[in-house]
Image (cartoon, grey):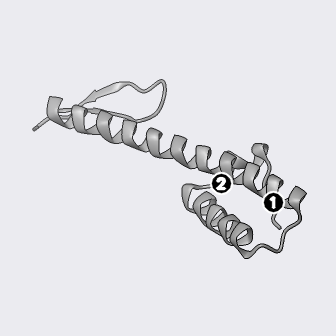
């Protein structure tokens, strides 16, 4: 079993985390794990699911900000500490 820890989560892309989560589901459904391995895998899976949900929420926020900025004719960078940039011709 891959040892994905909480500290490693921030290094995973959404796609990597989702792939690992799918692998974990397969491991759990396969039934070949000990009780302790099952609990550890379930815990890691829960952490990965939360990580994926946070990434989706952040993506939705960025899209909302970009959509609102496009409606204003102002581009707003989707990162913390961003500055507004007026786009001429819109």
| Front of the two marks 2 and 1 | 1
Quadrant of the frame with the C terminus: top left
Indicate the secondary structure of the residue bearing disc 1: helix
Quadrant hosting residue 61 = top left
- Label for residue 38? 1
In the depicted view, which residue is nearer to us: 17 or 74?
Answer: 17
Instruction: Look at the picture and state if 58 lies above or below 19.
Output: above
Q: Residue at x 75, y 49 (%)?
A: 43
Tell me the element at label 2.
loop
Residue found at x 33% / y 42%: 63
For the view shown, which residue lies furthest in the left direction?
89
Image vertical order of residue 39 relative to residue 51, above or below: below
Q: Are marks 2 and 1 in contact (CB under 8 Å)?
A: no
Q: Quadrant of residue 17?
A: bottom right
Residue 33 vs residue 62, the one in the foreground: 33
Question: Considering depth in this image, is 11 or 28 the residue closer to the camera?
Answer: 28
Q: Residue at x 60, y 50 (%)?
A: 49
Residue 25 in the image, given as x and y percentages of width and height: 66, 66
At a point 84% along the width and 68% down the height, the residue shown is 33
The percent coordinates of residue 73 (x first, y second) are 16, 32
Kindly identify which numbered label has been placed on residue 62: none
Q: Identify the residue position indicated by label 2 in the image.
A: 12
**Vertically, is 85 above or below 51?**
above
Whole-percent x, y for residue 41 in the image: 77, 57
On the image, the x and y values in percent for residue 56 come to 46, 46
Residue 50 horizontal side relative to residue 79, left or right: right
């Amino acid at each position: 079993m891959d040892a994905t820890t909480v500290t490693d989560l921030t290094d995973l892309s959404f796609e990597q985390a989702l792939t690992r989560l799918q692998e974990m589901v397969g491991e759990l459904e396969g039934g070949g794990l000990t009780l302790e391995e099952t609990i550890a895998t379930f815990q890691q899976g829960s952490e990965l699911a939360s990580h994926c949900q946070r990434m989706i929420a952040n993506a939705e926020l960025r899209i909302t900000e970009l959509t609102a900025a496009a409606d204003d004719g102002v581009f707003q960078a989707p990162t913390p500490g961003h500055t507004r940039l007026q786009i001429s011709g819109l």
